[in-house]
Amino acid sequence: MLSKKLKEKIENLKKETFALFPESKTELKYENNFQLLIAIILSAQTTDKQVNKATKNLFQKLKTPQDWVIMWENKIRNYVKTLWFYKNKAKYIYQTCQILSKTPFEKYTTLEQLTLLHWVWIKTAKVFLAVTQDAPLLAVDTHVHRVLNRVWIVKTKTALETNNKAEKIFTENDNAKLHHSLIFFGRYHCTARNPKCKQCPLTKICDYYNKKN
Ligand code: SF4
């Protein structure tokens, strides 16, 4: 059971983040759902801009898992070497594509099925389903983790911990829209360094702000 104060914070957060970022959606560039999954895998610890740069030419050539398997792991490495953990990413993308070249990708439609694939963590799968199916899931990335802790909706040390708490706090109705607006709020407004507190409508409920002022 959530306290009245926490419920009010959540309502405020939803209202203001929706108002600030009403049209937010993924900034990853892709032509089909398979490419989107690859882009999300590549985006771990990396910005969407960097991923788009790396995949710009790559996605023109590689549109299916079979295309990637033919390319081999070493060649994939060359294309993504500007990204963090590129060796692991190339390795697991190759292994994932080997599986997907034998089983139709369309069969992977749930969190449980998607997380069976290599390097597809719960966050990756949630982002994928939120984007492709508008699924009522809140993917907790570094931005969402930071924002929820700053306004003290959760008090956690890791994104995984935040994810577990958020699953109990937010309802399905909240999640569908909140996913994108919270990520944008953390990415462009409540940034890790120099958050835009002076223009923020959440100062009253923000513990981070109130401790500093
Ligand atoms: S007041 Fe500052 S720290 Fe708090 S939510 Fe707004 S931008 Fe983030």
Image: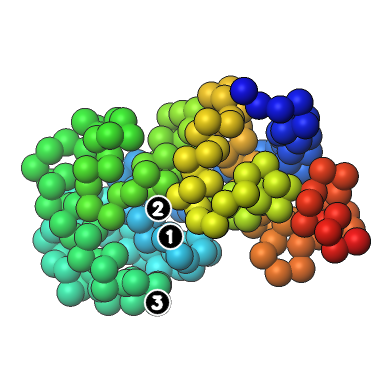
C-alpha span from label 1 to label 3: 12 Å
Q: For the image shown, how many numbered marks are present on the structure?
A: 3
The residue under label 2 is 40
Q: Is residue 108 left or right of residue 178?
A: left
The correct choice, above or below, for 196 with respect to 78 in the image is above
Pointer 2 and pointer 1: residues touching (CB < 8 Å)?
Answer: yes
Instruction: Indicate the amino acid at tag 1.
Output: Ser
Q: Residues within 10 Å of mark 3 (few under 14, many from 20)?
A: some
At 46% from the left edge and 29% from the top edge, which residue is drawn? 135
**Disc 2 C-beta below 8 A from ligand 1:** no
Front position in the image: 26 or 151: 151
Front position in the image: 23 or 62: 23
Asked if residue 30 shows in the view, the reply is no
Residue 57 lies, in percent from the top left, at 36, 65
Residue 8 lies, in percent from the top left, at 78, 30
The residue under label 1 is 43
Residue 22 lies, in percent from the top left, at 71, 37
What SS does tag 1 mark?
Answer: loop
The residue under label 3 is 82
Which of the 4 image quadrants contains residue 132?
A: top left
Q: Residues within 10 Å of mark 2 (few under 14, many from 20)?
A: many
Which of the 4 image quadrants contains residue 10?
A: top right
At 78% from the left edge and 51% from the top edge, which residue is drawn? 207
Quadrant for the N terminus, please: top right
